[in-house]
Image: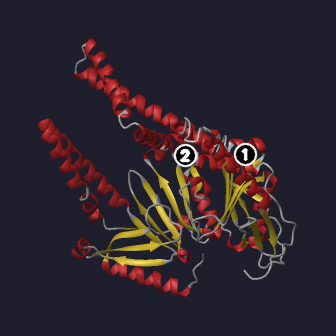
Amino acid sequence: MNGPVTTTEPERRLHPMSWLFVLLQQLKQFIVPLAVLLFFGRGSSDNGGSNELWPLIGVAVLVVTSLWQYFTYRYGVAGDHLVVRSGLLERSLRVIPFARIHNVALQQSLLHRLFGVAEVRLESAGGAKPEAQMRVLKLEDALALEALVRRRGAAPSADAVVDEPAAHTLLTLPLGEVLRLGLVSNRGMIVVGAAFAGSAQFNPKLIPNVFEAFGMRLFGYAGEQGFGPVEYAAAGLAVFAVLVGALRLLSMMLSLLQYYGFQLSEHGRRLTVERGLLARWRTSASRRRIQAWTLREGMLHRLLKRRSLEVDTAVAEDGRQQRALRELAPIATPAACDGLIEHLLPRADWLQLTWNPLPASSWWRLFLPSVPFVLIVSAVLCVRFGAWGLLVLLWLPWSAYKARRRAQRAAYAVGEDIIAVREGWWNRHWRFAEIDKLQALQLTRSPIDRRCGTATLWMDTSGAGALAPPLRVRFLPEAQARELYARLSRTLAQRPLRW
């Protein structure tokens, strides 16, 4: 950038204790080499000195680096830009237009809350890294910066004055809803799987040894009691029930830590989500940055009469979900989810959409992929256990039944401003997006499609998450697919892309 950048307001520093949080973050990154130096570097060096000083020297270097960042980091406002300066010998200057900041994320760990500070990340749609990361600011300064981004990002020019919109709460989760969220989620299983994977890295025999010891004790006790087949089956069901109950209890505890105090609020055209029990997360994004929507409903959701509503935003994520605006309603009643969609997409007429069913005769195409897998598993088990392996084939009628129900429920809807797809039966989802947000259309035909005279229409938007279902219409008759493709193409050609 040519010429100096003059800020219209006095430049600000980070919080005086920011160096401590930077140091802690660096210690997390270098904990392994420091531990190696500490435990394997003991003893005398060749010149008679002690190698035990090297870890202390490494920590001292990290402390100096953290203090250096505090004394050289500044931020301020220059017109409609945020200016961030850092470095002394090697200087860095970032000029970030407020209109480019799509997401403002505030994170508070328990230590942050004790000091009354927060880590701030300013994110855009294009970069894999945040435009600016401020570790850390005083909480009042962080909230003021978030409000400044809201006002300046909504202003038509740098000289325009935009009043701070009043906050309007759209959804809150009381304690009962948070516990229901833990009950329907699989967070406990994810944590247990991660623990198994981590333990396997350090000691691959640990998990097998634990299961072997537990199995020997369990079967030894059963042998002493003279259990028969009925007792073994009852004991197996009891152990399974205890494990499922323990996993659900763990999921409820994790949900309580992550979603306690959940609140979705609206500030003008921006949405803000705040949640967390010990650590708190607060993320804010403009409504126009929402690219696609996903409404989910699993079996447990239906039993509890609940759903969840997620969105994809035009912000590149780094794999940590809490830093992106994704869950507008982690769990809520169907009426509450529909109300949110109606409020945030008033032109979509969500409740008045006309759903067009897909051909029910396509059920066999949903059933076919499971057949080879079941046959292979059955063959392997027959080699090991004889005729008992044929019991696996009982999965095929259930798989066929699921495929029929999925095909009966699959449908799509096209409105003036929205296109939506409905899929699933056991686990259901609705995937939809505003037509103005579509970035690409693709009509594909596999060999089976050509044989059956069908096609698949794919629709791409920006910022789709890795776990989000694709936005596509499958098994359409070819003529109908081409007509829909041409209709959407004409609409996209007449309307500008709303980023």
Mark 1 residue crowding within 10 angstroms, few (<14) / some (14–19) / many (20+):
many
| Whether residue 393 can be seen here | no
**Percent x, y for residue 410?**
38, 63
Which residue is more in the foreground, 200 or 149? 200
**Residue at the spot x=51%, y=34% of the render?**
249
Q: Amino acid at mark 1?
A: His
Q: Quadrant of the N terminus?
A: bottom right
Q: Is residue 473 above or below residue 156?
A: above
Judged left or right of residue 329, residue 381 is: left
Mark 1–mark 2 Cα distance, whole angstroms, equals: 26 Å
Q: Amino acid at mark 2?
A: Pro
Q: Which residue is mark 2?
A: 33
**Residue at the spot x=31%, y=25% of the render?**
215
Judged left or right of residue 100, residue 40 is: left
Which residue is more in the foreground, 337 or 43? 43
Q: Is residue 348 above or below residue 399?
A: below
Which residue is more in the foreground, 94 or 349? 94
| Whether residue 181 can be seen here | yes
- Secondary structure under tag 1 reads helix
Task: Please state which of the two labelled residues, at mark 1 or mark 2, is closer to the viewer.
Answer: 2
Identify the mark at residue 468; answer none if there is no mark: none
Which numbered disc flags the more N-terminal residue, 1 or 2? 2
**Percent x, y for residue 147?**
78, 62
Q: Is residue 358 above or below residue 37?
A: below
Q: Quadrant of the C terminus?
A: bottom right
Examine the image and state in which quarter residue 386 appears: top left
**Percent x, y for residue 383?**
13, 41
Mark 2 residue crowding within 10 angstroms, few (<14) / some (14–19) / many (20+):
few
- Secondary structure under tag 2 reads helix
Examine the image and state in which quarter residue 31 appears: top right
Q: Which residue is mark 1?
A: 112
**Residue at the spot x=51%, y=83% of the render?**
491
